[in-house]
Amino acid sequence: MTMHESLTASDSHGEAAVERQSVYVYEAPVRVWHWVNAFAIFTLALTGYFIGSPLPAVPGEASANFLMGYIRFAHFAAGQVLAVFLLLRIYWAFVGNVHARQIFYVPFWKGQYWKEWWHEVKWYTFLTSKPKKYVGHNPLAQFTMFLAFTLPLVFMVVTGFALYSEGAGRDSWEYALFGWVFSIFPNSQDLHTWHHLGMWVILLFVMVHIYVAVREDIMSRQSIISSMISGERMFKDRED
């Protein structure tokens, strides 16, 4: 959805209203989820790395150390926080504004979407000099968020709880809900490997996401980073 489509309006006399220079895009629940999610992913990636590649040794007597236990506890706690907030985020996609559900689908059936998607590809690869304005995510961002973040995030939650159910036991609610994953990955080590690879997919997305957000704040015609703090998207000019 372009800025022109979203910001122009008519008053009661049918005359065009003055085009606003900012619009409220991201509601408070979306912004809270974004930052809680960022903290949880950072904690999960850091602790997950050490779970996959444990420290070779710790100082002092073994009976006096519980370092890996604390690391695993932090990992499990962050994973549960991530899962709860993901469920709340899915709920908000139904009750929030139109921008709250952009990361959960790609309108592949719309020709105009792919036309604008291709324009964004050229913009990010420095093949066009002027970006378009968008109130929410631009088409390429929506595409990338869905394929490289939303789907991998769901995969990580499902596989994470499946792995946790191994320790919790077959009579646990975790195994009752996620034990079916082992019918797809009968070898637990395979599931560990895929879960580990999923971490790198999300980390690569995070690195690109941060780069693009900073780049867009500098080079594009609308604010990006501050929008996820205030909820307002500011526009730098009045042109379409």
Image (cartoon, rainbow, N blue to C red):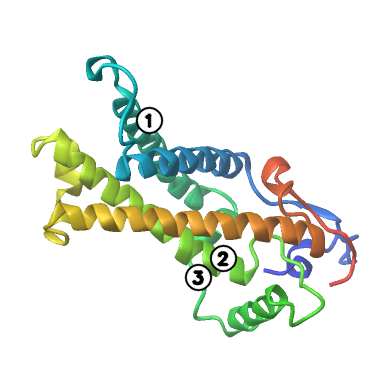
Q: CA distance from mark 3 to mark 2?
A: 7 Å
> Disc 3 marks which residue?
106
Circle 3: is it few (<14), some (14-19), or many (20+) Cα within 10 Å? some
**Residue 141 pos. (x, y %):** 60, 66
Looking at the picture, which amino acid does disc 1 mark? Answer: Ala
In the picture shown, does residue 64 fall above or below 12? above
21 left or right of 50 in image: right
Give the residue displayed 32% in from the left and 44% down from the top: 53
Is residue 51 visible in the rendered image? The answer is yes
Give the position of the N terminus as an image quadrant. Answer: bottom right
78 left or right of 166 in image: right
Looking at the picture, which amino acid does disc 2 mark? Answer: Gln
Does the residue at mark 3 contact the one at mark 2 (Cβ under 8 Å)?
Answer: yes
Looking at the picture, which amino acid does disc 3 mark? Answer: Val
> Disc 2 marks which residue?
142
The one nearer the camera, 134 or 221, is 221
